[in-house]
Each structure stands twice: as C-alpha cells, then as structure tokens.
Image (spheres, rainbow, N blue to C red):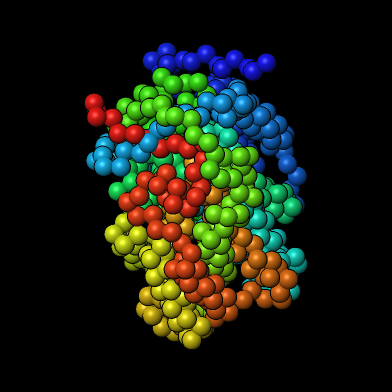
Amino acid sequence: MPSTPPTETGPSQRAGWARGFEHPVAFWFGALCCTAGVLLHLPMYYGARDMGYRLKGMAPDAPMLTGMALIGIGLVAALYGVLPRDRAGLRRSVTGVRVQALDDAPIRRQHVALLAVMAVAVTIDVMKPTALGFVVPGFAKEYGLKAPGNPHGHPAAAWLPLTGISGTVLGSLVWGSFADWAGRRASIMYAGLLFVTTSICGAMPGFKWNLLMCLMMGIAAGGMLPITFALMAETIPARHRGGLMVLIGGEIAAAYVITSWLAAKLVPHYSWRILWLVGIPTGVLLLVLNHWIPESPRYLIARGRRAEAEAIMARYGARVVKSPVMAPTDVTAARVGYGTLVRRPLLGPTTAITVLGLGVGLVTYGFQLWVPTNLQRIGYSAVNSAYVVRNAALIGLPLTVLLAWMYDRFGGRRTIAVSSAATAAAMAGFVIGGDSLAHHRMLLSLLLIVPLSAVSSVVAMVAAYASEVYPTRIRARGTGLAAGMTKAGGVLILAVVVGSPNVPGIRATALIGAIPLVIAALCFLISGPETRGRRLEEIARDLGAIEVGDADLEPNPAI
C-alpha cells in the first residue's frame, strides 16, 4: 500500500527558524550540541599558549572527550532533522509537474540575496582546502615530518593534504547524491554544521588524529560547491545564469586572498592551528544565513509542501503548472546514479568535464598548494611567501570578473577552452623560469596571477557548466562529479609527493598541470555543448537527456 504523503504545512504556519527542515527541533538541538562540543576543545588549545600552542604528545583532556561525545550526538540529531520523511514521494510526485525557468525575468532582490549568501558559502567552503598550503609548514615542524625544511623527517608532511583532498573527492560524490535526495538547502545546512565541527582539527594533539579530522574536514568541504551551483542553476534566470555563477564561483580567489592574509597575520602568533579554528565562526555564520537560502521548488513539491514551493516561486517570479505525463525518452527517466553520467548521451560532456577537472586539480594541488612551501625553500620567509601569494591573488581578482563576462557573452564552451589554454601558457612560464624566478619578484607575482586567479575561475566554470548541462534529477550528482574531479587531480599529485623523497619544485608542478589543461581545451571544443542563454531543459533535450518530471520554472504573467 503506498504511503500517505506528509501533511503540508504552509510557510505562514511555520516559525522562521523551522522553515525548510523536516524535523527542525532535532536539527537545532544537534547544532547546539555540536557548537558546545567544539567550544569544549578550545581550553586545551588555549592552555598551550606558553608553549607556542604546540599540542604534540599531549593526551586529550576531559572537556575535549566530552566535546567529542556531544559532537557525535549532535551530528546524528541534525542529520535526522534534515532527512526527508517520505523518500518514495520524490519519485511519485514529480511526474506531470513542470517548474520552468523564468528566462526573461530581471534579477530581483531575492536573487541578489541568494547570490550574496552563496558567495559567502563558496568562500567559507574553499578556505578549508586553500588553508592546507599554509598549514603544512607549521604542521611538519611541530611533528617532525619530512618536508623541504626537514628532508630527513618521517613520515611525509604531504599526508595531511593528501587525506584532506581525498576527503573532498569523497565529499563531492556523497553530497551530490545527498542533495539530489534530501534537497539542496538541507545539504547546505548540514555541510555548514560539519564546517563547525571539523574545525576541532586545530585542537587535535596527535598526528593520526589530525589526519582523521582533516579527512572529515575534506568530506564536509567537498560538497558545498556542487550543491550551491545546483541551487543557483535552478533559481537564476537563464540569460544571467552562466556569468553570475562563474562570478560567485570566482570567490575561490577571494578565499585564497583571505586565507593568505590570515596566515600572515595570525599564524606567527597563534600557530598553524588557528587556520583550522577560524572555521568555527565562519561555519556559524553560514548557519545564521539560512533564512536567505531557499529550497528547490521541485523538491518541495515532491515532499508534498506545495504551499512553500509556490511561496518561493512567487518571490522569484514563477509558478507551478501541470503538464501531460510524458513517456521516458532515455536512461535518465529510469533509476539514476553516477553511472548515468558516463553513458550516452552524457558521455561526451562528462569526458570533457573530467579531463578539465583533473587538470585543474593538478594545478591547484600540485602547483598552487606547494607555492608557499616552494617559496620558502628558495629563500622567502613564511610571512613573505604568504604576502607574495596574497598580492598575486589580489591583483588577479579583476580577472574573475573578466572571465565571468566572457562566460556570459561568449558561452561556457569557448570560454572554458580559451581560459584553459591561457592558464597552460602561463604555467609554461614557470617551466621555463623555474627557481630562478625567486630573483625576479615582480615577474614571479605576475606569473602567479593566472594559476591563483584564473584557475579559481576555471573551477567555477566547471561547476557552472556541469550544473547547466546535466538534467535536474542528476544535477547535484553532475556538479558533484565535476567538483570531485577538480580534487582527484590533487589526490594523484599528492600521492606522488608522499612517495617521493622531495616535494616537486615549481618547474615540475607547472609542467604536470599544463598538459591536461591543453587536452581539456580540445575536448570542450570537440564535445562540449553550448549552454549560453538556454533553458536547462532545452540543453537536456538537445542532448537527448530528458527525464520524466524534469523541472524548471515557468513564467508567471501575473507577477
């Protein structure tokens, strides 16, 4: 016997703190437990201030152990708070419902608020992995690990970024599936809570504890980018969608600026651990901003919460309409999963996205991650290397705006191809110059602009493109795959670093990253469909990837 759909509760019947949650009391109880648990880790960290905040060799104290228990309880309660009551309802309810994109509507203040919050979410998310490059030198020194400054240490300091980036690959794939099932907003909120809890990595005393918590931190951070892009793709009008998503995704460069600035200002006084602990206030900020994060209307309709869906769509200038039930036209109408992405008709776009993602990952985690370490190896102090990186990222911020405009004006396919080729050309400068660039600070800073800023925009373009090209039922999985591939390249290069006697120099990491970028540019020109100014369903239809109940937002003439 089919289960009865949950009773609908209109938005006016729910308090603000309860909107968007299946079990709001459970979620906020869990959030409270997690926050208290994290705060109980701080006394041990602060107590080590007279020792330079070095915790190596210390045993966890009673407050820390109590905090770990509270975090475990809180995460379970919060997960229950966001899980949907009726999973089968998603498959039943979407058939015959169309929620079509308001392609010609102007950007409203609701869109602006959403974009602002998504920019904050992306920045907070990216600050986690970008901090790895500034954490590794101090982490290696405290635990006596093998690094450029200590070639005889053991084990390799690269284990920390390897576990962290491996976590982001896993997180991208897991969160992609979770967001397609439990909803975009619920996934963002739970990820924000994980940001808060995994910040306790900064208070972990043991080497292995640091690796475990860094893995968990990576899993938490890995999903935010694909979820936010899936939500934006389903909410922003088509004529503005591509450029705005790339612009928001370009906050990756801003995250690098903020992280490098924090490293220069805070690490000399509070040790490398402070870069993890700043995740506490940033994660709480994301939870506070939940009021401005809407849920996907299609998901709300599937949950039987039509009044909430219509209220959201009215704010964005759209409405729900019924359409005739259509027969499935391809595999996306059947049971979906990640295997759907590597079968026709999606094989071509998936191949291009995968190759580009791997190339970007090799640049980000093979070159960019080790820039602070390599600069220190060739004579720069830790503070000076952080400032060099920060200045290059600051100078390159306008490049993000330029690439966003190009994406909007010329389309994703061509812009991705051109920017990938240009990044490869800049990397060639490091291949030619190598360590000698240390004596030419201006040239070094100028060359760093592209791998620090343009590559960040390419990451944003990959996620934006994936959120446009994949159908609704697998959109979060598609963006999760794209985000995961940008980290998988990092796992490959970091695994090489762990097994090598030394960290690769600037010349080697530049060459490794440049080659797949050239290949990716060719793949996009050959097999990447154009998405500029087109409705999401039109793109899917041309690919032959239409599904039953595939949804977008229909214009509401009364609004």
Nearer to me, 205 or 168: 168
Residue 81's spot in the image, x, y percent? 58, 25
Examine the image and state in which quarter residue 511 appears.
bottom right
**Residue 548 horizontal/vertical position (percent):** 52, 36
Q: Is residue 469 above or below residue 406?
A: above
**Observer able to see residue 398:** no
Q: Check the picture and name the quadrant holding the C terminus.
A: top left
Tell me the residue at 38%/80% (across/down): 443
- Is residue 235 shown left or right of residue 58? left
How many callouts does the rendering have?
A: 0
The residue drawn where x is 56% and y is 17% is: 5
Q: Which image quarter is the N terminus in?
A: top right
In the rendered image of this protein, does residue 313 appear above or below residue 15? below
User: In the rendered view, would you say 427 is above or below 59?
Assistant: below
Q: Nearer the viewer, residue 277 or 107?
A: 107
In percent of width and height, residue 24 lies at 53, 21
Q: Is residue 207 left or right of residue 394?
A: right
Residue at the spot 32% in from the left edge and 31% down from the top edge: 318
Q: Is residue 1 visible?
A: yes
**Which x, y percent locates residue 490?**
60, 63
The residue closer to the viewer here, 20 or 369, is: 20
> Residue drawn 52% across and 25% down?
93
> Is residue 300 or residue 260 the one in the foreground?
300
